Amino acid sequence: MVSGRSYTCSAVTGIMSHRGTTIDSLALCDARRRIRRLTGGSLVTAMDKRALSERDICTKFVAPALRKAGGDEMLQIREEVSFTKGRIIRGKLVSRGRAKRADYILYFKPNIPLALIEVKDNTHSVGDGMQQGLDYALTLDISFVFSSNGDGFVLHDRTGHGGVTETTLGLDSFPPPAELWQRYSAYKKLTHMARFRLECES
């Protein structure tokens, strides 16, 4: 058994040939695709993934999922967002109170936060960050809370709309900003004109 490393098809074929085993290249590549699905699109083994830090999980798994969903990194995705007493801090902390930090806050526009993501390392289950995320979302009045450990997401819908409060999602199934915005607008009961004005504001 070879652990802690990632291999290309040719490298693994070489290892198997050395052991006197004939391996079908299509079957090998199919195995690689299965590994990619299980590890969120990378060739990191399960053992490797559990050794990654929380920040590594953010960088290697969560951030790519957000980009794939269509999030704009400059305008809609903020990482390690500090806040206190319901106020998001930009720059130096000047107010009293202990600052807290959300792993990600997602925006429709810079002044309209839609979702908060709390990330844990892969030794935790996918939903282990949910309670912390809910506490933060309550403080910041954010409607959608996600928890992740790099294997997928658990979504908690604080709006009470849609019938299902919590949903488990695959790593490649994070909802796009337009979907979250539509659900947020329905919850806030925004008229078509109100939505149009907000969408057109710079």
Image (cartoon, helix red, strand yellow):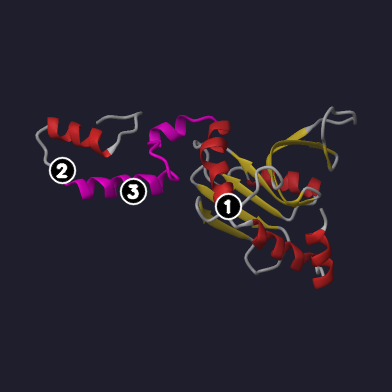
Q: Of the residues shown, which amino acid type is indicated by label 2? A: Ile
Question: Residue 15 shows which numbered tag?
Answer: none
Disc 1: CA contacts within 10 A as few (<14), some (14-19) or many (>=20): many
Q: Nearer the viewer, mark 3 or mark 1?
A: 3
Q: Which residue is mark 2?
A: 23
Which residue: 58% across, 43% down?
128
Q: Of the residues shown, which amino acid type is indicated by label 1? A: Val
Q: Which residue is mark 1?
A: 154
Q: Secondary structure at mark 3?
A: helix
32 inside magenta stretch: yes
**Residue 155 vs residue 56, the one in the foreground:** 56
Q: Of the residues shown, which amino acid type is indicated by label 3? A: Arg
Tell me: residue 69, above or below residue 149.
below
Of label 1 and label 2, which has the lower sequence position? 2
Q: Position of residue 56 (x, y in %)?
A: 54, 32
Q: Which residue is mark 3?
A: 33
Which residue: 85% across, 28% down?
93
Disc 2: CA contacts within 10 A as few (<14), some (14-19) or many (>=20): few
User: Cα distance, mark 3 to mark 1?
Assistant: 24 Å
- Give the mark count: 3
Q: Is residue 149 visible?
A: no
| Quadrant in the picture for the N terminus | top left
Pointers 1 and 2 in contact (C-beta within 8 Å): no
User: Cα distance, mark 2 to mark 3?
Assistant: 16 Å
